[in-house]
Image (cartoon, helix red, strand yellow):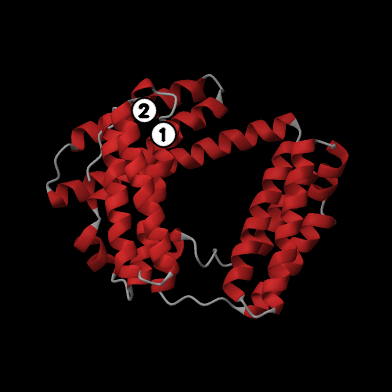
Amino acid sequence: MVLLISLLACGGVLAQTPPPANAPESAASRLAGNKIDKVQLTSNLDSVGKLLESSSAARQIDSSKAPEAMQRRDRARELHGAAKAALEQGNLEKASALLAESRSIFFDAVRFAAPEEVSAKKLENDYLLRLESVQALLGAYKRVSDEKSAKGVSETVAQIEKSMAAAAVLAHERKFKEARVEIDRGYLVAKAGLTSLRSGDTLVRSLNFATKEEEYHYEIDRNNTHQMLIKVLVDDKKASGEMVQAYLSKGQALRIKSDEAASRKAYDEAVKLLEESTAELVRAIRNAGIYIPG
């Protein structure tokens, strides 16, 4: 109970920590003009430092002696140190991103060190939160598909609902770890389907990207989502077929070229290559037996 109270308290202190500046999910925030506050970031850096070293969660890790927990806390410490150095150098975006990653990895460490009953409750909560996300994405997918009169919607919806139903059976049996794996599949199908429907000119107009770099970050998120969906299909025999692998290879090659273009700040080229890469991943996913638009 002390551990849970400590984590909740720390979460409250850190709730205002800005999201990683370069994370794809932050595109909307950047568009809204959100800025990183140096004073708040400095305070958050100090709070995370105390969390890593002197909180009840840190003591739980020390007492557990669990190798996985110790390794993750060491990594969280390294990232915290790097965040401090970035802040001292005036790079607020880098410092914010590193600090968020440090905190995330530390909480991973806590989960490895937590008592079994706490871990079980965490698994249940994680499953329920992901289920809510899938339900929201599914609703949005249906609305956008109606607006665009998209084809193949019923197949995608069926895939999502199949994962939700399978996850519900596992959750009823209190197998929340397995249920989370299944609901994650539905989440990725829903997210990939929705972002594919809203790609191209419609997406750019709806989010009103100020620059090609903003659009590039969103396209990175789309591409990553499709790559994650491919990973959950790895165990499926269809996902190991020659045709699927051919599409994946082409998609990965295009992603590498896009990354190289972005490194030169050639974002027009990078966005175009990312869209082509994602299109290849969509073809791979379809050949693996899951239909998504794109």
| The one of 117 and 97 positioned closer to us in this rendering | 97
Disc on the earlier residue, 1 or 2: 1
User: Does residue 288 appear in the picture of this structure?
Assistant: no
Mark 1 falls on what kind of element? helix
Q: Name the residue located 43 percent from the left edge and 72 percent from the top edge.
A: 30
Kind of residue indicated by mark 2: Ala
Q: Tell me the crowding category of disc 1: few under 14, some 14 to 19, or many 20 or more residues within 10 angstroms, Cα based.
A: many
Mark drawn on residue 239: 2
Taking the spot 21% from the left edge, 50% from the top edge, the residue there is 144
| x, y percent for residue 219 | 35, 58
Q: Vertically, is 86 above or below 19?
A: below
Q: Which mark is residue 118?
A: none
The quarter of the rendered structure image containing the N terminus is: top right
How far across and how far down the image is residue 119, in percent? 68, 34
Which quarter of the picture shows residue 183? top left
Examine the image and state in which quarter residue 53 appears.
bottom right
Q: Position of residue 2 (x, y in %)?
A: 80, 45
Position of 182 relative to 224 (above/below): above
Residue 185 numbered tag: 1
